Amino acid sequence: MRFAAMFLWLALPLAGYAAYATLGAPHISWSYRFVDNGDPFNPLAKRFYLDCTFVGPLGQFTVPAEAGRCAWIKFFKPATAQ
């Protein structure tokens, strides 16, 4: 039992790799385009987002907004070679 406990630390890197393999790499929201109500500098104005740009370890991705909203963090997988 004591010998098996020495390999318990491997659970965290394996879980991290499993998350990367299934979800992809995390990317943070960098910029966005939106439609405003004539008040673009008011942070409390109602906005409808058109597209969102995410930046992370795999580069930059611009995707359409989902239901007029942009997430703060989104996961992307690397592009496969064809």
Image (tube, rainbow, N blue to C red):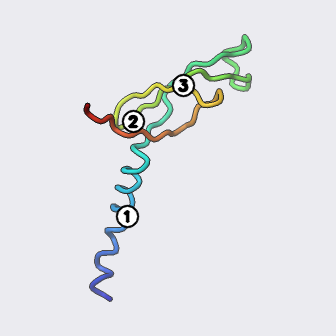
Q: Earlier in the sequence, mark 2 or mark 3?
A: 2
Mark 2 is surrounded, within 10 Å at the Cα level, by few (under 14), some (14 to 19) or many (20 or more) other residues, namely: some
x and y, in percent, of residue 38 in the image: 72, 10
x and y, in percent, of residue 35 in the image: 66, 16
- Mark 3, residue position: 64
Give the numbered dot on residue 73: none
Is 7 situated left or right of 68 in this image? left
Q: Nearer the viewer, mark 2 or mark 3?
A: 3
Mark 3 is surrounded, within 10 Å at the Cα level, by few (under 14), some (14 to 19) or many (20 or more) other residues, namely: some
x and y, in percent, of residue 43 in the image: 68, 24
Circle 1: element type: helix
Q: Amino acid at mark 3?
A: Pro
Which image quarter holds the C terminus?
top left
- Mark 2, residue position: 56
The answer to which image quadrant residue 40 occupies is top right
Q: Amino acid at mark 1?
A: Leu
Mark 2 → mark 1, Cα distance in angstroms:
22 Å
Mark 2 → mark 3, Cα distance in angstroms:
17 Å
Tag 1 and tag 3, C-beta contact below 8 Å: no
Identify the residue at horizontal 43%, vertical 47% (top origin).
23
Which image quarter holds the N terminus?
bottom left
Instruction: Examine the rendered structure and indicate whether residue 4 appears above or below residue 21.
Output: below
Circle 2: element type: strand
Is 72 situated left or right of 62 in this image? right
- Mark 1, residue position: 12
Instruction: Examine the rendered structure and indicate whether residue 67 appears above or below residue 73.
Output: above
